[in-house]
Image (cartoon, coloured by chain):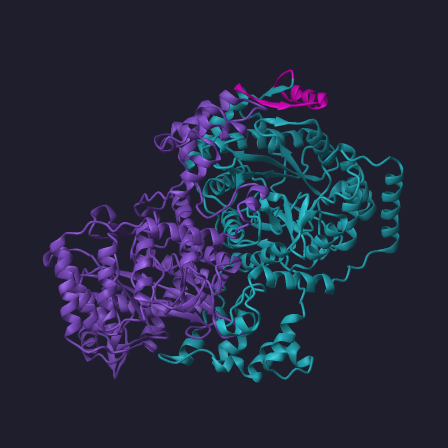
Chain colours: A cyan, B purple
Amino acid sequence: MSDLESGETAAAQSPGRRARGAGGGAAARRQARSTPKFESFPNIVRQLPPTDILSEEAIEVIEANADTLMEEVGVEYREDAEALQLWKDAGADVKGERVRFPKGLCRELMKTAPSQFTQHARNPARNVEIGGNNTVFAPVYGPPFVRDLNGERRYATMEDFRNFVKLAYLAPAMHHSGGTVCEPVDIAVNKRHLDMVYAHIRYSDKPFMGSVTAPERAEDTVKMAQILFGEEFVDNNCVLVSLINCNSPMVLDGTMLGALKVYARANQASIVSPFIVGGAMSPVTVAGTLTQVLCEATSAIAFTQLCRPGSPVIFGTFATAISMQSGAPCFGTPEPAQVLMGAAQFARRYNLPFRSGGSLTGAKLPDAQAAFESANTLWPAMLGGVNFMLHSAGWLEGGLVSSYDKFIMDCDQLAAHQKMSAGVDMSENGQAMSAIREVGPGSHYLGCAHTRENFQTAFFVSQTADNNSFEQWEIEGSKRTDHRANDIARKWLEAYQPPEIDAGIDEALKSFVQQKKDSMPDAFT
Amino acid sequence: MSDLESGETAAAQSPGRRARGAGGGAAARRQARSTPKFESFPNIVRQLPPTDILSEEAIEVIEANADTLMEEVGVEYREDAEALQLWKDAGADVKGERVRFPKGLCRELMKTAPSQFTQHARNPARNVEIGGNNTVFAPVYGPPFVRDLNGERRYATMEDFRNFVKLAYLAPAMHHSGGTVCEPVDIAVNKRHLDMVYAHIRYSDKPFMGSVTAPERAEDTVKMAQILFGEEFVDNNCVLVSLINCNSPMVLDGTMLGALKVYARANQASIVSPFIVGGAMSPVTVAGTLTQVLCEATSAIAFTQLCRPGSPVIFGTFATAISMQSGAPCFGTPEPAQVLMGAAQFARRYNLPFRSGGSLTGAKLPDAQAAFESANTLWPAMLGGVNFMLHSAGWLEGGLVSSYDKFIMDCDQLAAHQKMSAGVDMSENGQAMSAIREVGPGSHYLGCAHTRENFQTAFFVSQTADNNSFEQWEIEGSKRTDHRANDIARKWLEAYQPPEIDAGIDEALKSFVQQKKDSMPDAFT
């Protein structure tokens, strides 16, 4: 291995080291590793074929079952007379708040939704494609707690929120700034959406998500997007993707419907997500859960098209399974992975972008359980063909906690999946015939021309894994992965520089936020 | 969630609790969890379609490149005049120890190898099918060190060896007893194979692997198998699967060839495995590495058929990538996963069983790195279609260490993959229409008839994950996953009971071992 450790080879591998005048050796390598590099990857374009977990026959059975239930049981549209009227006009059977659907009505209505669309970022280089073979990673959404840089578990604050926006901005494989990266409980409930949307705009230039906790907060989000992008641009382009959870089983409530209508009418995308704890909010079987998911998702997706035909929408599924022991949701287990892959097949069948997956776990610490469970959702999500992956970094403790350490660990995994999804390079250089001819039996490839030419980019390099010898690892403090991730999170936040923003736009945004905040007293519910 | 926690529901879920007179409550649940249950799963029959990472065009390019190199560069068969003569007779071009192969010769010779075969265990219920859609999990192989139950890293002993055999015997999803589960360095090198084979036979009733460190040790293994199964049975059936690594690039050495010939002629299976650290022992690219793997594997597989046409053989690939920083091998990264999936495609193309995968990691501790990296090999292995998975539990620190804690954690993951691979239940019960009809919008499934009927087996239950509330987890000691796994390993070893064995056979085995040991002085090289 000595060829690799010579100063000459190290310098050839990393021109940057020479530029800093470090001629080689351990000190130079440490220096190079300690200076964070922030490249930014475009969204993934998957080269691996999706895995079809359901046979064509199974697909047809589940679809027919869903059709039967849509007609027989139906879905409740609560606290929203307008929604009921829209369904009545569309030909559904509306009794009270219960809407029953003639077979095929929702599938027919869904056809006007685009199969793929661009979500625009304020930096066009950060635009993302949603749908098709594309995969977009977005951070954790919703936790009221953080596990902070000192390992303390406490309520999240607006400062934490800004920190996670900054980390997501810096992480190469994080394509999206997300939404409620943590719940800033130090800000009034009726005002925090303003600070959150402003933070996404100001501290990142990646695309972001809108508020859904009340229709007027959705409207505020749209207005801030209009200040940023211009009214006409927003009306013609998707600049917001927002998360609309169904109240499974088979209910859409007034809050969610209110936000859904605001976004659809503004031509902005919603992710319509049945939020399922299998065994509690759906049947204990995969096929039964998929049937229910299909009813809920297709009904709500069709509803977006009643609000504005052609508006972008994402077929979502968030699935977990209830623990027999504690009643808590379990993550990274086989059945939710099967639900995910099955739902993805239906989204492909209906030519709709699909949301699911994430680095989900029930673990309390960023330990082996956290890693196994996260990987056990990431893999089926990537192979199932997820287009938009919320919770792809930072999620801990069943979504109660945003973890700094885990955010870094997860981002490392996302970068690995980005490389994995790119498929195999079959170029002449990729075929490497010259190398095999040059080296021949019984020798090694460390010094051959092809290796020297490709070494720097050939292999994925993890930022959080330790691949040193046991002895070297001991000398460096016998650190666990989460400790190494903690070091990185600190370094990133130290190195963070906000992206440029037009001063006039920034002023207008700040003034909008201030005026809105001044217009109402603080409310904490 | 209270329905689930009532004594009645708990008792209905677990009849065993009633039998012990525990009416319900936390104490009864703790009691039930603390008593290990040792069911045993048959090998996996995968219901998920394999993922093809290479296009048909890519397959043809790599195969053509391999053909070119087989003819032009060839493979060295070292220290084995008989092997060279066999190749000369088969029509290869032999110059010195270099063997060059006319295009298609090895593919033609491979055709007599079975596409699937049964490896027999002394307990027929533990027989495994190798090939086709079957997957067999086998434990870690080769580490000279252990990380023991006190967390100490030290040289492995014969007692450790027996302990890992016992754990593999008890683990439900471990289908195989494996081979060198750790290297018992307290026993003389020239004698330890006798104790190892005896331990597999005596302390387990699952199928096992043979010694490959010298031809005479392979012969001893065959003789012990003949004592156990009878000579004629061994000549007609596979009872041993043994690991033959190629010395990549493009070399087979005398030791490996000697063992390979012994097993093939005894009609026993070898796993022919190019052992690749990409960038050192193969080109730095995936396509280049696959080309070399194809040369090495097809040549050695063809050679088994020269020794005995029709003898079982497994196409193996062990792939990792070199670390730019340390020169050490990296695990769980994208490129080796791509090599694995690509090689699996070639094995399918040639109708041969395939070996690869495992819970591989470079981590020094069973922490998040260990879990991420292990999962990042397990998933592509399962979706790539691996038939025989060595190192599927216990591997730590790049294969230098067998870890008790990680063994338990990994076995839990294997059980999850067993459930995942079973696919989706599309029976009437699986479709769960009655449940959705019964529950309807806005209610929950916790108490419905379908849930009560299916609750006990509906969801995979992890043995090592903690899905309690944060508060409960704190009360129970804020344990990390590896600590919980440690508790389980201790309980399993305490509960272990050896399977019955015929006293005459046991006596004959012990006497063979003693006579062999007495016949030579200890040697430590």
> What quarter of the picture does the C terminus of chain A occupy?
top right
Say how many tags the image has.
0
Q: Is residue B307 visible?
A: no
Residue B168: x and y, percent?
33, 54
Residue A28: x and y, percent?
63, 79
Q: Quadrant of residue A484?
A: bottom right
- Which residue sits at x=45%, y=73%? B283
> Vertical placement of A239 versus B378: above or below?
above
> Vertical placement of B518 versus A524: above or below?
below
Residue A157: x and y, percent?
74, 48
Residue B411: x and y, percent?
39, 51
Looking at the picture, tell me which residue is in the foreground, B381 or B463: B463
Q: Any magenta on residue B336?
A: no
Q: A213 left or right of B258?
A: right
- Which residue sits at x=43%, y=71%? B277
Q: Quadrant of residue A413?
A: bottom right
Q: Which residues are magenta?
A: A72-96
- Which residue sits at x=88%, y=44%? A514
Q: B296 left or right of B122?
A: right
Q: Is residue A252 visible?
A: yes
- Which residue sits at x=48%, y=69%? A430
